[in-house]
Amino acid sequence: MGLVQSLTYRAAKRWIAGKDMDAALERAKEANEKGLGTILNYLGEDVSDPAVAESQFEEYVRLQRALIGKGVDGCVSVKLTQFGLGVVEDAHVVDKVALLAEEAGRAGRMVWIDMEGSAVTTRTLAVYGRVFESRKNVGVALQAYLRRSEDDLRALLAMGAKVRLVKGAYREPPDLVFRSRDEVTKNYLKLMRMLFEAGSGFAVATHDSRPIREAVSLSRSIPGARFEFEMLRGIRDDLKLKLAEEGHRVVDYMPYGEEWYPYSVRRIKEHPSNILLLLRSL
């Protein structure tokens, strides 16, 4: 590891659960001890080699079995391009996710599908829909910054889908996304209210105080709504504990793996406080 990466990793340990599965499982246990659930993600995306896609799938199989075997309160979240979406037949990707979901279901666990760039949004939702037909313990992320997401959410709610609502973090063409932070937040609040009204099991995945306050308020006025808060490891930890103490289900999203560096660069760019954290490490 070069000097820059070595120093960056000192800061990145705040939001990375480790470079390997064993380290990630230890961080997951620590989160459980604080009253938090966990979602583990093996870092990687845009796989172009079918052999690599197979090895990524095998890592998730081992990870899921380790979570279940060790009694960790947690589940896995996958990116479909890790399984070769766009490289192998979509039916092959469907089969891989369905296998994970079948095993997870026997242990009462979820499998989440992360949302990636807009180039694969339609195919990701199509794969999700095919898996969800037979495996109801599968959820999918939806990005509030995409203009299309309201229509996508209506279709997902009509089928009873499980949705994780996020804001979105990829660079996208301006005609596809809401441009300002205020517009994204307004759309997030609109979609979140739709989820609360449907109440079919969903996740409010944001670190933004405004939608979190609104979610708490809606949970009081719609007590039957089943939802959880999901936040990235190392971000707003005090708020996570406060929400958990108030009786809300709170889940730490924990990425791990050798691909930690590009992920960390995104985190540093997105949050000014992370730049300060990096500078202190330097």
Image (tube, rainbow, N blue to C red):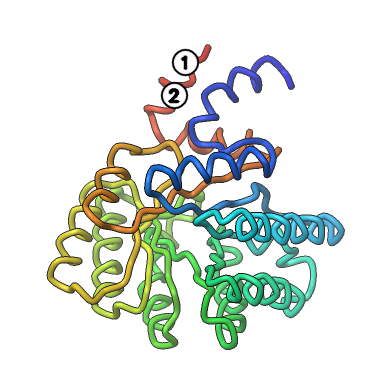
Depth order, front residue of 65/124? 65
Q: Which residue is mark 2?
A: 275
- Residue lying at 67% horizontally and 77% vertically, measured from the top left: 98
Q: Which residue is mark 1?
A: 279
Three-letter amino acid code of the residue under disc 1: Leu
Rendered location of residue 208, percent (x, y): 28, 47
Secondary structure at numbered mark 2: helix
Depth order, front residue of 105/186? 105
| Displayed quadrant of residue 124 | bottom right
| Displayed quadrant of residue 51 | bottom right
Rendered location of residue 235, percent (x, y): 39, 38
Q: CA distance from mark 2 to mark 1?
A: 6 Å
Q: Is residue 10 above or below residue 183?
A: above
Q: Is 117 positioned to the left or the right of 204 in the image?
A: right
Please tell me how crowded label 1 is: few (under 14), some (14-19), or many (20+) other residues with Cα within 10 Å.
few
Rendered location of residue 62, percent (x, y): 73, 57
Q: Is 167 positioned to the left or the right of 181 in the image?
A: right
Q: Is residue 190 above or below residue 22?
A: below
Q: Is 264 positioned to the left or the right of 144 in the image?
A: right
Check if mark 2's residue and mark 1's residue have beta carbons within 8 Å: yes
